[in-house]
């Protein structure tokens, strides 16, 4: 999360439980994961709750660093978005989609399936892609299987996509007309579309969902306070706050900002694969990146 978004949840928690001295540490995916693993190797278990990419939480689960959540709020989360053993639960998702500039792409040209990106008209820098879209890449390989997925990625590389850093940047460049097509997050495009930008996105099969999740430490120093925080984040009020941040909550009784982002109406494939099973180098080799 962005610092201002993390602060909203922490401040709500502090307002509810002022007797708890709540503090939080924010970092990117790799630094956060490395800090927890380094501390645990030294026999220090200093975190109570962790929020982050589910791939990182799955690695922590492998290492025995996650406990079991007993929150009554778990019942409001669909099975596809939570661990069967209640070790983690997805609190919101980023849906990968094909997005397009409606002034540069005629309705008859819109790719309505992933294979549509392989049309010769989209060659030579007409498709924008983030060079760190590892979760989309491995999600497609997992959903389709190695042979079909690998063949698709090879053909997509032959289209010579244009790489730009960050999905927010890609969405904005798409709206500005720099690219006709982009592989990016549906909620970013939907937000721009509702503001009048000439962009739209396609409900695909499958749509890889990159989850952000929450988990309880296996050995929390402050178990009661930790459980209170988990309850708050998983509550309907917590999900409404996530929604106000522009996220797409996974809680079943909180509707996303746009009806078309509703998980019940989409063929979502949440990527639940541990970080150590996703080698970024595989993605970079597939697209000739160094």
Image (spheres, rainbow, N blue to C red):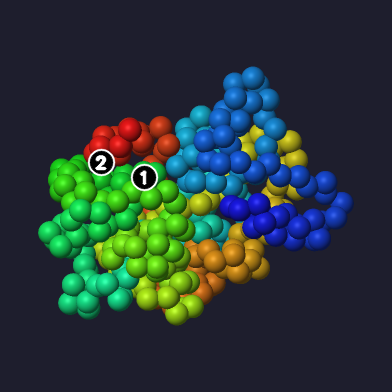
Q: Nearer the viewer, residue 146 or 97?
A: 97
Q: Which residue is mark 1?
A: 131
For the residues labelled 2 and 1, say whether their Cβ atoms are less than 8 Å apart.
yes
Q: Is residue 54 visible?
A: yes
Residue at 21%, 49% (x, y): give it: 160
Of the image marks 2 and 1, the number of the one nearer the N terminus: 1
Q: Nearer the viewer, residue 106 or 149?
A: 106
Looking at the image, residue 193 lies above or below residue 213: below
Q: Quadrant of the C terminus?
A: top left
Q: Which structural element holds mark 2?
A: loop
Residue at 49%, 78% (x, y): give it: 195
Taking the view exactly as shown, the residue that stands out farthest to the top is: 42
Q: Position of residue 127 (x, y in %)?
A: 27, 57
Taking the view exactly as shown, the residue that stands out farthest to the right is: 19
Residue at 49%, 39% (x, y): give it: 56
Residue at 50%, 65% (x, y): give it: 248
């Amino acid at each position: 999360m962005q610092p201002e978004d993390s602060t909203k949840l922490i401040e709500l928690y502090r307002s509810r439980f002022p007797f708890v001295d709540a503090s939080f540490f924010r970092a990117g995916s790799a630094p956060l994961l490395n800090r927890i693993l380094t501390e645990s190797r030294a026999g220090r278990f200093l975190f109570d709750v962790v929020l982050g990419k589910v791939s990182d939480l799955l690695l922590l689960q492998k290492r025995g660093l996650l406990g079991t959540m007993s929150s009554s709020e778990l019942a409001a989360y669909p099975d596809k978005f939570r661990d069967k053993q209640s070790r983690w639960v997805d609190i919101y998702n980023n849906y990968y989609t094909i997005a397009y500039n409606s002034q540069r792409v005629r309705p008859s040209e819109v790719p309505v399936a992933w294979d549509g990106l392989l049309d010769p008209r989209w060659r030579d820098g007409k498709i924008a892609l983030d060079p760190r879209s590892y979760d989309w890449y491995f999600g497609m390989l997992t959903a389709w299987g190695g042979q079909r997925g690998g063949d698709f990625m090879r053909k997509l590389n032959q289209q010579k996509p244009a790489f730009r850093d960050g999905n927010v940047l890609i969405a904005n460049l798409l709206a500005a007309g720099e690219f006709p097509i982009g592989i990016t997050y549906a909620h970013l495009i939907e937000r721009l579309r509702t503001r009048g930008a000439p962009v739209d996105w396609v409900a695909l099969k499958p749509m890889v969902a990159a989850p952000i999740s929450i988990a309880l430490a296996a050995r929390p120093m402050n178990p009661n306070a930790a459980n209170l925080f988990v309850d708050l984040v998983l509550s309907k009020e917590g999900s409404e706050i996530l929604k106000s941040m522009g996220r797409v909550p996974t809680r079943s009784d909180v509707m996303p900002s746009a009806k078309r982002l509703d998980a019940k109406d989409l063929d979502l494939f949440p990527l639940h694969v541990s970080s150590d099973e996703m080698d970024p180098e595989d993605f970079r080799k597939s697209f000739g990146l160094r």
